[in-house]
Amino acid sequence: MRCLVACEESQAVTTRLRAGGVEAYSCDLLPTSGRHPEWHIQADALEVVKMEWDMVIAFPPCTHLAVSGASWFEEKKRDGRQQRAIGFFLAFTALDHVPKVAIENPVGIMSNIYRKPDQIIQPWMFGDPYEKKTCLWLKGLPQLVPTNIVDPPPRVKTGENGRTMAAWYADAWALPPHERSMLRSKTFPGIADAMATQWSNARTLFDLQET
């Protein structure tokens, strides 16, 4: 199986797919922060995806699509950023030549603009005690089966209005915006394991410390 993991600089999913015997490549405009640059294609994912692939797992940027940024939506509509992000996302829904496709994004406007996701998952369903509600749109792939349900820490209040946010993300607000965005875009290990094992027919989880 040849798999493209689009918009992934971390190689979190790519490395696990490789450990299971899949010929997987990460792709991003940024250089990889993973340990295998030989498996990374630094290029426009929409060009690379035109090649022959058996599976594409896409993580299109969510900055202009996620409900967490709703306060800036009007500005992003006016200057075209949101429309460009929508077009980029939708390009992955039109991969007729790829039999298996998964598109990942947090809760946002694509559920209305495109369609409702096939599945919504959380890191705590796969062994990581964190909250990050994540949508999956699937073609030719099964929904992920939870592997290890754990309890996330209590949410943190963000002000007097009673609103709360996930504890790990509250801590991330101390970081500069670019670092905060990079941290929030990372795929949690348990979800990456589940994608690699359940979508590539691998039978076990992999200890990646030796790879």
Image (tube, rainbow, N blue to C red):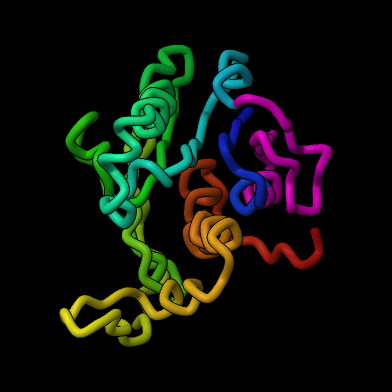
Vertical comparison of 45 with 19: above or below: above
Residue at 80% across, 58% down:
211
Front residue of 40 and 198: 40
Q: In the image, which residues are magenta?
A: 15-44
Residue at 58% across, 37% down:
5
Q: Total number of numbered labels?
A: 0
Residue at 26% across, 40% down:
74
In this image, 196 relative to 152: left or right?
right
Front residue of 77 and 64: 77
Is residue 163 on the magenta stretch? no
In this image, 185 relative to 157: left or right?
right
Where is residue 152 drawn, in percent x and y? 36, 81
Q: Is residue 24 visible?
A: no
Vertical comparison of 92 with 40: above or below: above
Is residue 25 on the magenta stretch? yes
Residue 101, located in which quarter of the rendered image?
top left
**In which quadrant of the rendered image does the N terminus lie?**
top right
Front residue of 66 and 120: 66
